[in-house]
Image (tube, rainbow, N blue to C red):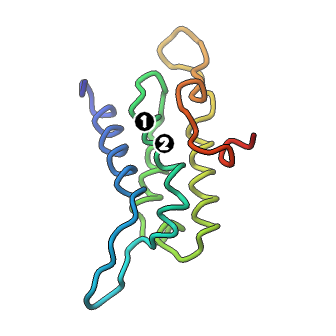
Amino acid sequence: MFRDRITRKRYRLARSLERAAAPERPHMGRGPRYLVHPEIALACAPSLRAMALALRDDAIVFGEDELRGIQSFITDGSSAFFGRDTTAAMRKAVGLQHAVLEPKPDDRGDGQVVTAGANVRYPSPALTGS
């Protein structure tokens, strides 16, 4: 199951995406109450869960740049995910989802195109444009 480094990285990133999709409880002490505001987590949750599902699917090919983009969205404090603008965060999450899940040629040598849309069910029609 975890044969190589990239597979371990994909599964670890999928777990991180699922944790980021769940709204956090407020911290009652000094400092900010939330690292990620619950409204932003709820707005980005469908896209984050769709990306996590795609990361766990071995038939979909991911490059290092795509994985780095997803990881920076949920870990970099300057990304829209940690801000207060729900619309900007949701647009960035949906943009990442569509950039990651678009059909790409498979690098396994058979030259067929891997379509992520056939394997990933989108949770809402608003994200697919239909």
Q: Residue most toward the right?
A: 130
Residue type pointed to by label 1 = Leu
Q: Residue 55 carries which label?
A: 1
At 47% from the left edge and 34% from the top edge, which residue is drawn?
54
Quarter of the image with the N terminus is top left
Q: Which of 32 and 10 is in front in this view?
A: 32
Q: What element carries label 2?
A: helix
Alpha carbon of mark 1 to alpha carbon of mark 2: how far?
6 Å
Residue 116: where, in percent of width, then height? 56, 28
Residue 24: where, in percent of width, then height? 35, 68
Q: What residue does disc 2 label? A: 51
- Asked if disc 1 and disc 2 are in contact, CB closer than 8 Å, the reply is yes
Q: Residue most toward the top?
A: 110
At 64% from the left edge and 67% from the top edge, which residue is drawn?
87
Residue type pointed to by label 2 = Met
**Image quarter of residue 58:** top left
Label 2: few (<14), some (14–19) or many (≥20) C-alpha neighbours in 10 Å = many
